[in-house]
């Protein structure tokens, strides 16, 4: 029997962040990963053609570049290097117009002013507001709930009226938010396209804050990528953990959490071996999987089990990677310098896509999020070529045969070809991943759900993953949710892993901590 202080189930970036923080505290940590390699959705490989490095899931990391959890780890000292495309993001409208987000605020202001002259000043004002509140907002969003200190600082900064207006902004649909702040389609499209990185459409409550957060981060820190591929971020996390004597076992799936007397005592792997965890078990897995399959409903309150029935996943995903013989021949000037490109719809079109998905229909005209990876990081493919990917969302529950996936990939290519005639002629390799293929690479991407559950307001904060405390602590003592199904949710920021590590350390160090958590759970689930 292995005997450690903490077992971390899953070597996704959240699990590795948690393991690093516990190792920093002097704990003996074992990370067990079911697949043959660490990283989960932060991984890279050559899939479209030899010599073309593709990010297999996530690719651009504005949240990572600003996250207190990841910044605290000093990953640059362990081999991580960030790269930036000349421009952050471009949104291409169906009629060929385009708007570009740049880290140079004057360039962005000039771009949005082409759609409405007043939006140049409005953009400057919005970014000034962001700079005023950004530290407190990021702390409030990414650190354990409730964010008492961050909220208190923000209240002192904004005052009572300002806090009320910020709270209102946090629940606005992005169409309403941008309609109140900007006059032209350019600025509105940048915010709305970024909101669509979640599963929320332009008219969904709460979509505004997501669009605002990603757009303002893009203005400030850009959408950086790890030099050499997304896997280099994972490599840095693993390398740092190894310097602190943390242990990583890949190809070791955990089948159950050993529970007795209401407390997690360890884990059992697929071969029946038990690992004793003297202080904590942290699970970077989906909440329904942890509770129902690894813990078992007999160890859970009946009310929590019923709540799990109402857990809502985000939409499924189809992703295509291409190896191109040259850069994409965009008709619109300036789009070629953007690392990220949104195309296929204007704001009304995005609302149509969101409505189709909500109604269980595959959108006839897909909205694409596209990455020009060699533009962002020249090491991704041979000189003069381009490594490119695009993904789009489809309803859950659909069956995607190989032939149907190919037809959808052809439709995706046509959307690009419409804005870049000659795109298809430059394709030298293609790889398609549907919902099943994404889940096969990373079991956490259930049916291709890349955000570990909906971003809708009814499944955020104290409602994530089910009504509760909004914290990593579970109803089982010394068992913690460390994955994106827990607050603060999807995105590569390490917040969920860091929060789980902090909860485990508090349980170990703070007298009375468990009593308070247990009493709160009793009130909620009795």
Image (cartoon, rainbow, N blue to C red):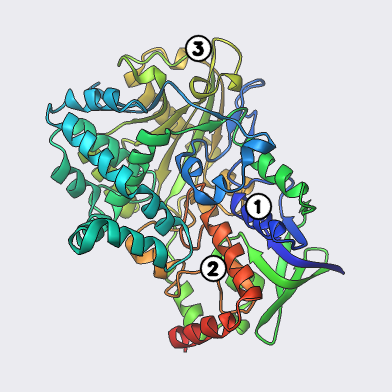
User: Is 520 left or right of 420, judged from the image as shown?
Assistant: right
Q: How crowded is mark 1: few (under 14 residues within 10 Å), some or many (20 or more)?
A: many
Quote the CA–CA distance across marks 2 and 1. Answer: 15 Å
Which label is found at residue 472? Answer: 2
Q: Do the residues labelled 2 and 1 touch (CB within 8 Å)?
A: no
Image quarter for residue 217? top left
- What is the distance, in whole Å, between disc 2 and disc 3 at their CAs? 46 Å
Of callouts 1 and 3, the N-terminal one = 1
Image location (x, y in percent) of residue 468: 45, 75
Closest to the observer, 80 or 209: 80
Element marked by disc 2: loop
For mark 1, give the secondary structure. Answer: helix
Q: Note whether 271 is above or below 329 in the view shown.
A: below
* Image height of 462 relative to 137, above or below: below
Pointer 2 local density, CA inside 10 Å: few below 14, some 14–19, many at least 20: many
Image x and y of residue 448, in percent: 51, 49
Q: Residue furthest front?
A: 156
Q: Nearer the viewer, residue 158 or 64?
A: 158
Structural distance between the alpha carbons of marks 1 and 3:
36 Å
- Residue at label 3? 326
Q: Name the residue that disc number 1 marks.
A: 16
Q: Are marks 1 and 3 in contact (CB under 8 Å)?
A: no
Please name the residue shown 38% across and 35% down the image: 220
Which residue is at 45% across, 50% downward?
Answer: 398
How many residues crowd around disc 3 within 10 Å: few (fewer than 14), some, or many (20 or more)?
A: some
Residue 88 image point, x, y percent: 39, 28
Query: Which residue appears at 28% of the width and 35% of the height?
Result: 190
Give the residue at x 63% y 79%: 477
């Amino acid at each position: 029997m292995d005997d450690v202080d903490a077992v971390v189930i899953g070597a996704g970036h959240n699990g590795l962040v948690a393991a690093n923080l516990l190792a920093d505290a002097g704990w003996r940590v074992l990370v067990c990963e079911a697949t043959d390699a660490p990283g989960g959705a932060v991984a890279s490989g050559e899939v479209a053609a030899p010599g073309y490095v593709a990010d297999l899931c996530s690719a651009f990391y504005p949240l990572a570049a600003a996250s207190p959890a990841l910044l605290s780890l000093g990953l640059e000292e362990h081999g991580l290097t960030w790269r930036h495309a000349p421009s952050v993001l471009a949104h291409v409208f169906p009629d060929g117009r385009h708007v570009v987000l740049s880290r140079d605020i004057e360039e962005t202001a000039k771009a949005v002013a082409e759609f409405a002259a007043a939006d140049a000043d409005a953009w400057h004002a919005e970014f000034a507001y962001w700079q005023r509140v950004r530290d407190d907002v990021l702390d409030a969003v990414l650190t354990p709930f409730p964010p008492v200190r961050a909220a208190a600082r923000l209240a002192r900064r904004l005052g009572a009226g300002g806090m009320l207006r910020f709270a209102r902004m946090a629940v606005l649909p992005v169409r309403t938010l941008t309609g109140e702040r900007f006059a032209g389609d350019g600025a509105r499209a940048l915010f709305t396209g970024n909101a669509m990185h979640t599963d929320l459409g332009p008219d969904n409550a709460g979509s505004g804050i997501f669009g605002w957060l990603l757009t303002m981060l893009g203005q400030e820190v850009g959408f950086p990528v790890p030099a050499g591929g997304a896997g280099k971020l994972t490599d840095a996390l693993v390398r740092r953990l190894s310097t602190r004597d943390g242990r990583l076992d890949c190809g070791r799936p955990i089948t159950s959490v050993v529970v007795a007397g209401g407390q997690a005592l360890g884990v059992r792997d697929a071969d029946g071996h038990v690992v004793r965890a003297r202080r904590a078990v942290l699970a970077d897995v989906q909440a329904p999987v942890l509770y129902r399959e690894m813990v078992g409903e007999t160890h859970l309150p009946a009310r929590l089990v019923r709540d799990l029935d109402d857990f809502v996943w985000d939409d499924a995903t189809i992703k295509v990677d291409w190896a191109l013989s040259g850069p994409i021949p965009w008709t619109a000037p300036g789009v070629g310098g953007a690392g990220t490109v949104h195309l296929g719809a204007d704001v009304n079109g995005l609302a149509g896509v969101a409505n189709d998905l909500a109604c269980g229909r595959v959108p006839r005209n897909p909205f694409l999020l596209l990455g020009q990876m060699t533009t962002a990081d020249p090491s991704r493919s041979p000189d003069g070529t381009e490594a490119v990917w695009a993904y789009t969302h489809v309803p859950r529950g659909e069956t995607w045969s190989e032939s149907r996936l190919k037809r959808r990939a052809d439709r995706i290519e046509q959307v690009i070809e419409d804005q870049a005639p000659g795109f298809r002629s430059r394709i030298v390799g293609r790889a398609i991943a549907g919902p099943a293929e994404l889940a096969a690479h990373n079991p956490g991407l259930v049916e291709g759900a890349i955000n570990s559950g909906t971003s809708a307001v009814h499944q955020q904060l104290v409602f994530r993953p089910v009504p509760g405390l909004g914290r990593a602590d579970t109803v089982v003592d010394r068992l913690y949710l460390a994955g994106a199904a827990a607050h603060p949710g999807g995105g590569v920021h390490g917040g969920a892993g860091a929060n789980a590590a902090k909860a485990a350390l508090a349980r170990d160090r703070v007298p009375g901590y468990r009593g308070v958590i247990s009493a709160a759970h009793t009130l909620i689930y009795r």
